Image: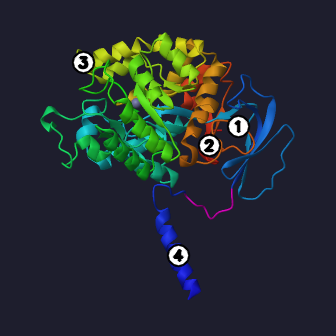
Amino acid sequence: MFARTSTVAVAVLCLVNVTAFAQPQSAEPPSVILFDNVRIFDGKSDTLSASLNVLVRGNTIDKISKDPIPTDRSANTKIIAGGGRTLMPGLIDMHWHTMLVRPTPATLLVGDIGYLNLIAGAEATDTLMRGFTTVRDLGGPAFGLKRAIDEGIVPGPRIYPSGAIITVTSGHGDFRQPFEVPRVLGAPQSRGEHTGAAMIADSPDEVRVRVREQLLLGATQIKLTAGGGVASPHSPLDVSTFTEAELRAAVEAAENWGTYVTVHAYTPVSIQRAIAAGVKCIEHGHLMDEQTAQLIAEKGIWLSTQAFPDEMADAFPPGSLERYKAVEVFAGTDKTFTLAKKYGIKTAFGTDILFSPRLAQRQGELLAKLVRWYTPAETLVMATGTNAQLLTLSGKRNPYPGKLGVIEQGALADLLLVDGDPIANIKLIEDPAKNFVIIMKDGKIFKNTL
Ligand SMILES: [Zn+2]
C-alpha cells in the first residue's frame, strides 16, 4: 500500500516536472573530456595563461592543471589535443530576441506561431554555432524554444527568457492597428499579446498581473519599455511611458519572486524614473546625458547597451518614421560608451538584432566593434565574465545554477576552442565557422572540426 502511494506521489512529481522548469536528466555516466595543452582566456583577466590542461566531467569544469591530468581510457573519455590553441568561455549576448531575429516585422505579427518557432529553432542552432552559448532574451515568446533546447531537441544556447515585453498603450511594443483601439478590459487580446510577444498594461494593478503571468511562465527577469522605441509604430523616441508607480509595481512583483526588472530606455527622464522605481538594469541608454550617467554609476545600475550597426536601420523602409528614429538613436552610441567608460558604469554587451538573419550572422563582428572604446581583452571580458555577473541578478530564478562566463574549477563547461589568440587578434571572433574549432555547451560538444 505504501509503495503504491509513493508511486502515485512520484507520478505526480513527474507531471509537475514537465513544466517550463524541467531539466533534462541523463541515465548515462557523465562524459569526461580532457583538453590537453591549451592556453586559457578565463573571462576575467587580460592575458592568456601558459599551457594548461582542462578536464571537463559531465557539465562542469572539474580540474585545471599545468601537469598532465590522468584519465581512464573508458568509452566515455575523450582527449582533445589542443595544440596550444585558446580555450575561452562561451560568449554571452545580453540583449537577444530568439523569436524575433529571423521573421520580418509583418511575419511576426501575422505568421503562424508554429512557423515562427521553427525558424527561431534554426536561428538558435546558428547562434550556438557562432559561439554564443548563452543569451538573455529580452522579449518574445521564447519559453517553448528554451524548453526544447534544454531537453536536447534543438541545439541552441542557454536562454534567460523575459517572456512578453510589457508596455503601455501606445508604448514601445504596442503593435496594434488603429482599428483595434479602444482596448476594452476583458476583450480578446491583440495578436502581439496573443502570441506572447508583448503585453499591454495601463495601471499598477494591470502591470502586476502581467509581470506575475510572465513569472508563472518561467521568466528569469522582467522587461518593461520605459520610453519610446525605434521599431514601434506609435511611440516617439522622446516619450516616457510608464509612471513611477507602475514601474514600482513591476519591481515589487519581480522582487517578490526573487528577480529583477530591466527597462528599455533611451532618454534621461525615462532612465531616471526607472532608477527611482527600483529598476536594476537599463537597456540601450543611447540618448542619456552626463548627469544620468553619473546617477547610473552612483546607484550601481547595470547598463546593457549596444553598438548598433547602421545597416540595422535597413529593416525599416526608406523614409519611414522608424528609420528616422533609428538614425537618431545610433548617433548616440559613441557618447553612451564614452560616458559608460568615464563613470565606470557596469556595462554589459548585447546586440539586439531584430528582423535580420543576415545581420545575425555578424553577431561576433558586432562584439569586435567594441574595440573602438575598449581593449580587446576588456571587450572579451565584457561578453563573458561581466555578462555572467548580470545574469546572477535572476537569483533563484536562474534556470542554470552554476557559474557561467568564466573558466575556473567548478564552473559550467561552456567552452570555445579558438584557433589563435583572440586577445592578440579579436577579429578571430568575426569568423566563428573558421576559427571556433570546438564549441561546447553544458559539457557537450556541438561542433568539432579538429
Ligand atoms: Zn530589444
Looking at the picture, does residue 212 appear above or below residue 222? below
Give how far across and how far down residue 115 sits, in percent. 31, 46
Q: Which circle's residue, 1 or 4, is located before the other in the chain?
A: 4
Q: Which mark is residue 9?
A: 4
Q: Which residue is mark 2?
A: 440
Q: Is label 2 in a helix, a strand or a loop?
A: strand
- Mark 2–mark 4 Cα distance, whole angstroms, equals 37 Å
In this rendering, does residue 279 appear at all?
yes
Q: Residue at x 46, y 12 (%)?
A: 289
Q: Which mark is residue 321?
A: 3
- Mark 1–mark 2 Cα distance, whole angstroms, equals 13 Å
Give how far across and how far down residue 288 sits, in percent. 44, 15
Q: Which mark is residue 425?
A: none
Quarter assignment of residue 243: top left
Q: Which circle's residue, 2 or 4, is located before the other in the chain?
A: 4
The quadrant of the image that shows the C terminus is top right
Q: Which circle's residue, 4 or 3, is located before the other in the chain?
A: 4
Side (left or right) of 302 relative to 113: right
Q: Are marks 1 and 2 in contact (CB under 8 Å)?
A: no
Q: Which residue is mark 1?
A: 407
In this rendering, does residue 352 appear at all?
no
The amino acid type found where label 4 is placed reads Ala
Looking at the picture, does residue 422 appear above or below residue 24? above
Q: Residue at x 36, y 41 (%)?
A: 164
Q: Which circle's residue, 2 or 3, is located before the other in the chain?
A: 3
Residue stretch in magenta: 24-30
Task: Tell which tag, 1 or 3, sits nearer the viewer.
Answer: 3
Quadrant of ligand 1 in image: top left
Quarter assignment of residue 180: top left
Task: Tell which tag, 2 or 4, sits nearer the viewer.
Answer: 4
Q: Are marks 1 and 3 in contact (CB under 8 Å)?
A: no
